[in-house]
Amino acid sequence: MRAVRWIAALLAMAVFAASPLATADDMSDEDMAEQMQVMQQKMRRMEDKLRDAERRAPAKAPAGDCFFCSIEFEGWVAASYFWNTKGFENGGINGQDLGGFNNGTAPVFPLRPDHNSFSVDQVWMGMERPVSEDQRAGFRLDFVFGKTADLLNGGNDGFSGSQNDFHLFQAYISYLAPIGNGVEFKMGKFGTLIGPEVTQTTGNYNITRSNLWNLFQPITHTGILATTSLWEGGTTSFGVINETRSFTSRDIDLDNNKAITWQIGHQINEALWASFNGAYGGADSGAGFDAPSGDKETILDMTVLWDPSEKFSSYLNFDYVKNDAAGTTEGWGLGAAGRYALTERLGLAGRLEYADFDFAGDDFRLLGFTTTADYMLTSNLMVRGEVRYDQTLGGDLNQVFFDSGAGATRGNPGGGQVAEATNQVVLGAEVVYTF
């Protein structure tokens, strides 16, 4: 109201100044009093008009409630080159003879299937409106283009792509409910809570993903997830999802089953974090109409993160999977990885892992070691080089890697005969620009 009076006074002064001037000598006391009364009447009329205009004006958004100002963006472009020392004649480092599992082949190198090939792996764009007590509603969107999108859309282990280089990786709505310490709900499609590695290349120590990521861990889920803190230093998540893991080429819901996923984590101290994660329920909702209730999958995961200093960070990961979808598929794996910053720009990472899997009676044991060096050319541009070694350790499926010397080609990875190699070495390089 004070502002209205000030504006009215200023307007009245302007009107008075614009009117013909009269000196005190020309005006009597009565004339002066009459003129002042007229001015007061004009000011009251101006106040009324300004007050009406103020009432009709739309309410202004509170300071700090700018929608676009609250959205966070991230993204990067990643390109790579890989070479398999077994030398597939026409490309392909993914193909392995695993006794009919996954249409006759299964990848040890998910997301990077091609030998002697340059690849645009990820053009990633993410946007998020995070939730808080000040803004309780938000959302997250992640889009990816390139080879990663092609394979997530159902590219067949690198031998025949989906021909679709766009993939909607995450899309969910979030809400922070004022319950207890706050409960954040996510509804839509979101990344899994299971495992320390992620699909985003910028979130990993190494260029390639581990065998545990490939064989045991889901990538995304579609459903609803609730996360809260039930005790100091603890995080608890529980969700209801369509399936334990989503095979994106058949990302539909054809059955009456559902699954659950969870995470129970605790920050033990400033350097140590441990979590027990998992999923249980319908294995693949796109496998068939109203799949039997016994068609279940169990995924158990234990992840420990240890970051004792600014220079060194590491993780320890254990996984167990049992799937009754087609015979009994059961296995477990153990992996450890770490990265040490040699300088502010240069880092060296290593990963050691072991996997033991039984594909419906065919045993498969695999040992893997990966070492990666990364260097920041600028604050936005990183280059990485990698050497990866994988070795089978006996079992029914021992010679699983194809060798060009055995006649393996891209179109006919077995060359008309079984794979003959028990190991393979792959060299790779990656360039990542973040923005």
Image (cartoon, grey):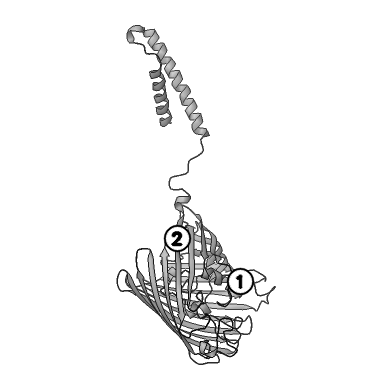
Please identify the quarter of the rendering in which residue 98 is found. bottom right
Numbered label tally = 2
Left or right of 100 on screen, residue 378: left
Which residue is painted at 45% across and 69% down in the image?
A: 79
Residue carrying label 2: 74
Amino acid type at mark 2:
Glu
Residue 352 visible somewhere in the drawing: no
Specify which label sits upstream in the sequence, 2 or 1. Answer: 2
Image quadrant where one finds the N terminus: top left
Amino acid type at mark 1:
Ser
Q: Label 2's element? A: strand
| Residue at the limit of the structure toward the left, as seen here | 343
Image quadrant where one finds the C terminus: bottom left
Left or right of 241 on screen, residue 36: left
| Residue at the limit of the structure toward the right, as seen here | 289
Q: Is residue 354 above or below residue 304?
A: below
* CA distance separating discs 2 and 1: 27 Å
Q: Position of residue 64 (x, y in %)?
A: 43, 48
Which residue is painted at 42% across and 20% down in the image?
A: 15
Tell which of 331 and 403 is nearer to you: 403
Q: Position of residue 378 (x, y in %)?
A: 34, 64
Q: Position of residue 112 (x, y in %)?
A: 50, 75
Tell which of 346 and 70 is nearer to you: 346
Discs 2, 1 touching: Cβ within 8 Å: no
Tell which of 283 and 235 is nearer to you: 283
Q: Position of residue 432 (x, y in %)?
A: 42, 67
Q: Residues within 10 Å of mark 2 (few under 14, many from 20)?
A: few
Tell which of 42 and 344 is nearer to you: 344
Which residue is painted at 58% across and 87% down in the image?
A: 415
Q: Is residue 352 above or below residue 118?
A: below
- Disc on res. 249: 1
